[in-house]
Image (spheres, coloured by chain):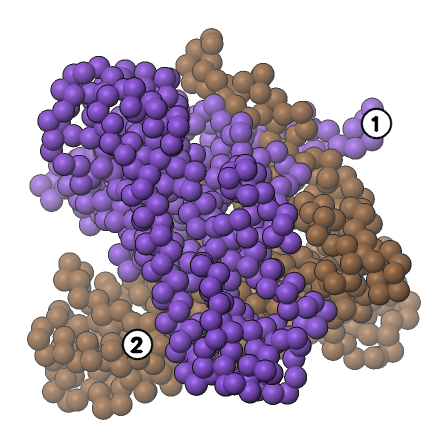
Chain colours: A purple, B brown
Amino acid sequence: MAKEITPRAEDYSQWYLDIVRKAGLADNSAVRGCMVIKPHGFAIWEKMQQVLDSEFKRTNHVNAYFPLFIPKSFLSREAQHVEGFAKECAVVTHHRLMADPNGEGLIVDPAAKLEEELIVRPTSETIIWNTYKDWIQSYRDLPLLINQWANVVRWEMRTRPFLRTTEFLWQEGHTAHATREEAIAEARMIHDIYADFAENWMAMPVIKGAKTENERFAGAEDTYTIEAMMQDGKSLQAGTSHFLGQNFAKAFDVTYLNDANTLEHVWATSWGVSTRLIGGLIMTHSDDEGLVLPPKLAPLQVVIIPVPKPDAAINEVAEKLKKELEAKGISVKYDTDEKSRPGFKYAEYEMKGIPVRVAIGNRDLEKGQAEVARRDTREKNFIPLEGLGSSIEKLLDDIQQNLLLKALRFRQENTRQADDFETLKQIIEEKSGFVSAHWDGTVETELKIKELTKATIRCIPLDQKQEEGKCVLSGKPSKGRVIFAKAY
Amino acid sequence: MAKEITPRAEDYSQWYLDIVRKAGLADNSAVRGCMVIKPHGFAIWEKMQQVLDSEFKRTNHVNAYFPLFIPKSFLSREAQHVEGFAKECAVVTHHRLMADPNGEGLIVDPAAKLEEELIVRPTSETIIWNTYKDWIQSYRDLPLLINQWANVVRWEMRTRPFLRTTEFLWQEGHTAHATREEAIAEARMIHDIYADFAENWMAMPVIKGAKTENERFAGAEDTYTIEAMMQDGKSLQAGTSHFLGQNFAKAFDVTYLNDANTLEHVWATSWGVSTRLIGGLIMTHSDDEGLVLPPKLAPLQVVIIPVPKPDAAINEVAEKLKKELEAKGISVKYDTDEKSRPGFKYAEYEMKGIPVRVAIGNRDLEKGQAEVARRDTREKNFIPLEGLGSSIEKLLDDIQQNLLLKALRFRQENTRQADDFETLKQIIEEKSGFVSAHWDGTVETELKIKELTKATIRCIPLDQKQEEGKCVLSGKPSKGRVIFAKAY
């Protein structure tokens, strides 16, 4: 089975597609650019949702649901927003089909044309701010802290499962505040939640930073991003949190009566992460044998396999271990299917990224031990049955830690400084990875570097050191380094 | 606040809309027929989702996600299915907008016309069975037990929040089986899960039955339904589970190699419940003071209110009670907001249907008691602080029981037998409710009765008694009674 995966070294892009398919994460669909998220992939998304949803609720957000459709005219209200989304949206123009009078099949019923076309939401700022107008009158209505879990559609020309699909699943938070400071604090708090989630659950280290003006969300005054390095050295923008200023409040005329009894426009944020995170998870940890999952997000954490097949003695030990692990909150499957042989099962669970495999055979039982294999390093060890549950619990923690450390090490090894343009260009072309370099702060220089190297400024790190330097391209003065990289 | 609700006796339909709005469940949106589900409404949906999702998983179903869009041609594949859905679907024809060259705003870019139009899914049988074709080859791939939580769109002419909206949220299960018997057993097991959920969680009694041929799902061989009686005597179809035979397997050519090595078409089911359940919940229990929620589905079960405002002594008792209740898994809010007076808060929480309200004042504390009000009967009692947590826990159980019994009693009082057509007609017109009557089994008679009375056959009850009788309209022989009612 593993043989069918193209090695990373041979074709990284094909390797990714092979993992997605062979690990049962997603399939192509009959609709261009839309994927089917298969049960194993969706179970990972459900784990992600649970953690994030409880973080949002812990910080006083509530969930709601807004319409899938947005009237076309809403999109034009905010000038930058329309620039960002009008060119890639699915447009509903009719509400009925009819039998083709000239043949077989169905045609669009011309009599059922909509007066105003509807856009399938690419993001929901406009429909939500149009609603907030009715919900916000006074400072008592603020802050308004709402999130929604939803599907969105952006008509992308080049798509890749999870990383860039026409339809994707995400959460989008939309909050309204009485002051600029409060809105900025909200955007940064969510930025922290995203970064913590990436590092502590996905074991995916991220650089926290602000986007340059050119890379900001369409309609934002500031965009905070988390950027992760994939195994090919490219950057993945894994989540963004936007301070929207008063742009949408002005576009939709949302004001509130402050405590001095004066009308003011409301301050806003929006923020989201999507099924793209699954793409990031795959590309951070997986290897040429298949998917590798951090235990905290693995839908199944431990699999127990009887060798060569179940019998009374093995069943007893396996069932006891299963109960012991479940009591610790660990998910376990005892695979008693006799249609497949152990070797086939090993390959299958490796492919699917199950963090720990326990093989129990009679010879091992006699020795009072079981063979435990960890997916991340593929090491196997014989572990005493006595205390096996606790050993496995500890092993899962080790794996989680190890994956994060390994990814951190990889990022460190692939982050370089460049103090002149040739070095920047050479690193990007020959080594890939992140390049830390000085930039003069202008959009012009940023675009020129992109044109010459295909690298973009991923972010201005929040922990950027004050350092006098010269822009690698223009030689103009700069006060700190930014991160350049090619990106997904 | 409660004054603003139209009494049921005055205008039932307006009463419903008032509850939806005043209890903060949903709002109209800028898009015709689409609602905004507000945080309180969405929190109820989340509770419903949790219970149902865990039931589906307990019975070995897994979640997945299929595309929002369906190629137009897919709809035509199953003859009855296309009849059922082609006339009410949102059609995507273009994938880009452009600036209007003749004026302001945006127009659809004529150059971005899709080769084949896409339908926004009204239900997903077609796109899913087109996918199953790739997933199913042998009997080892069966059964395939998949569910998805999704939004769907049906272009309805007359809409009402939750009950009938252009876009709604639901779950749709789609399963594939090796035999007819297995598929029927699946459809009936889910039917049982739906009925249990309605009765034991929603406290909404339902009649379990099969739909007549005329009322079946478009493409089904059998549709099982749960029918609930609303307070105006009308029936609400609250959930359906379909045995699809081999219709979709044939339409999408899904076959499997059985253990005799012969190719066979696969057997199918599909089943769903939607945000419509929230409409049913409202109309089963609520009164002229606002929403009434069964404790098991109330996002907030108990509210504690300091009278007239918080102080050290009240805070101590309230916080202790809160902890005690939370330890029992009961959700509690201690409302210390000093901007509103107790009377205002009482009305607000009554409106929102919070099952139990505890008022704590200093005079009561001196007597070692608190005032406990139950939302269902609006009774108030002084209860000793000693053991208050346990008293409230028991009270919540009582409320849950009482709501179910009350609804059962209401249904009993409003279910009548008719043995001739005039009686049937008179009951439907003057009393509403369910009418149990003999029917000759023909679509013709069914449609004629609908035309004359506006009542439809809601279902053929699964527990129908074998009874010789004559059809109320045609006088032809019948072997059992069916349920007639007007329906939402």
Does residue B113 appear left or right of residue B314 in this picture?
right
Figure quadrant of residue A267: top left
Does residue A123 appear left or right of residue B234 in this picture?
left
Q: Chain of mark 1?
A: A
Does residue B178 appear left or right of residue B171 in this picture?
right
Q: Chain of mark 2?
A: B
Figure quadrant of residue A360: bottom right
Residue under circle 1?
A: A103
Residue B454 at what x, y percent from top left? 70, 55
- Residue shown at 52%/23% (left/top)? B96
Q: Which of the image's four quarters has the C terminus of chain B?
A: bottom right
- Residue shown at 64%/47% (left/top)? A4
Furthest residue in direction top, as rendered: B102
Residue B177 to residue B107: above or below? below
Number of other residues with Cα within 10 Å of mark 1, as a class: few under 14, some 14 to 19, many 20 or more: few
Residue A91 to residue B300: above or below? above
Residue B237 to residue B376: above or below? above
Residue A236 to residue B129: above or below? above
Question: Do the residues under discs 1 and 2 have CB atoms within 8 angstroms?
Answer: no
Furthest residue in direction right, as rendered: B476
Does residue B383 appear left or right of residue B376 in this picture?
left
Question: Marks 1/2: CA distance?
Answer: 65 Å
Number of other residues with Cα within 10 Å of mark 2, as a class: few under 14, some 14 to 19, many 20 or more: some
Three-letter code for the amino acid on which mark 1 is drawn: Gly
Q: Who is closer to the viewer here, B345 or A186?
A: A186
Residue B136 at what x, y percent from top left? 74, 54
Residue A264 seen in this snapshot: yes
Q: Secondary structure at mark 2?
A: helix
Three-letter code for the amino acid on which mark 2 is drawn: Glu
Residue B108 at what x, y percent from top left? 53, 20
Residue under circle 2?
A: B326
